[in-house]
Amino acid sequence: MNASRVGERRVPVLDLAGNRVSEITLPKTFLAPLREDLVWRAFIHLQTHVLQPKGTFKGSGHKYSVESLGAGYGVARVSRIRAHGTGKAMAGGMINSAVGGRPGHPPVPEKKIHKDLNEKEKRAALAVAIAFTADREAVKARGHRIPENLPLPIVVDDALQSIAKTREVREFLEKIGLGEELERCSEKKVRAGKGKRRGRRYKRRVGPLIVILEDRGIEEAAENIPGVEVVKLKDLSVLHLAPGAKPGRLTIWTRSALEKLDEKILGGLA
């Protein structure tokens, strides 16, 4: 653990003009040890719970009645369809090597595809992902472009929740020094590989995450800014804080969300 992360730490609270108006003590959550392995396990756990069980039809390939001729006829002893005078007469059937036969080793819906995670480990992973947002080296390692004089984590007055215009959100982000970050997120490129023809043609960069306590217009105002995402504190998860299982996303907290962090996210156990 870095020496700067030991004990209580106070950070400035910014207004919508980017000026420092007060200070706030960081919640104990930010003192969690920086363990990427915990974040990775929680990310995989959440990702697998999006998957849907799949399997083949039980009667697949069993449509026809078949019989085997046995030995002594000079033909392969495979199961043959019991049909006469048709294109299917004496054709192989039922076995997986025959046209229209049953599938060989098909997927079964009973397969366990969801990765489990202990409840305490899940809580710890979320705390670790939050702590990574205050680590400048981790944030820079994700590719975010932030000015050196901007303290992390970024805490803003609750007036941010009431912004209702996209232009005002963009102006606020530029005033606190994230203009270069917005420019980075506006770039998009064509995906390499087959994904480009499977509905994932473009790759976009992940930008700032804004964590709020309640929405008073900011969610709709920020949804058209590339890379910017707004999430309520009660919905915050490792998927928001560590896209691609890589922790250290640039995060902006409203004051009220930060004050409720230990209570809402960690259940008051931090």
Image (tube, rainbow, N blue to C red):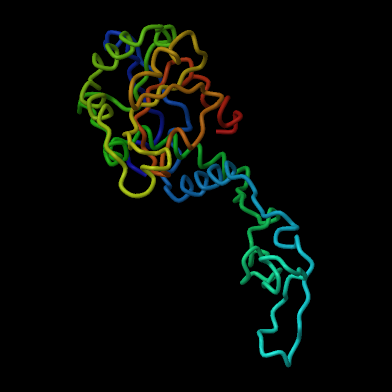
The percent coordinates of residue 236 (x first, y second) are: 51, 29
Q: Is residue 163 left or right of residue 270?
A: left
Rendered position, 74 above or below 201: below
* Quadrant into which the N terminus falls: top left
The percent coordinates of residue 225 (x first, y second) are: 34, 20
- Viewer-closest of 95 and 163: 95
As drawn, the residue found furthest toward the bottom would be: 72
Rendered position, 65 above or below 11: below
- Viewer-closest of 43 and 137: 43
Q: Residue at x 27, y 33 (%)?
A: 188
Q: Residue at x 33, y 49 (%)?
A: 193
* Quadrant into which the C terminus falls: top right
Q: Residue at x 66, y 66 (%)?
A: 87
Q: Is residue 247 left or right of residue 76?
A: left
Q: Is residue 11 left or right of residue 184?
A: right
Q: Residue at x 76, y 68 (%)?
A: 83
Report the label total: 0
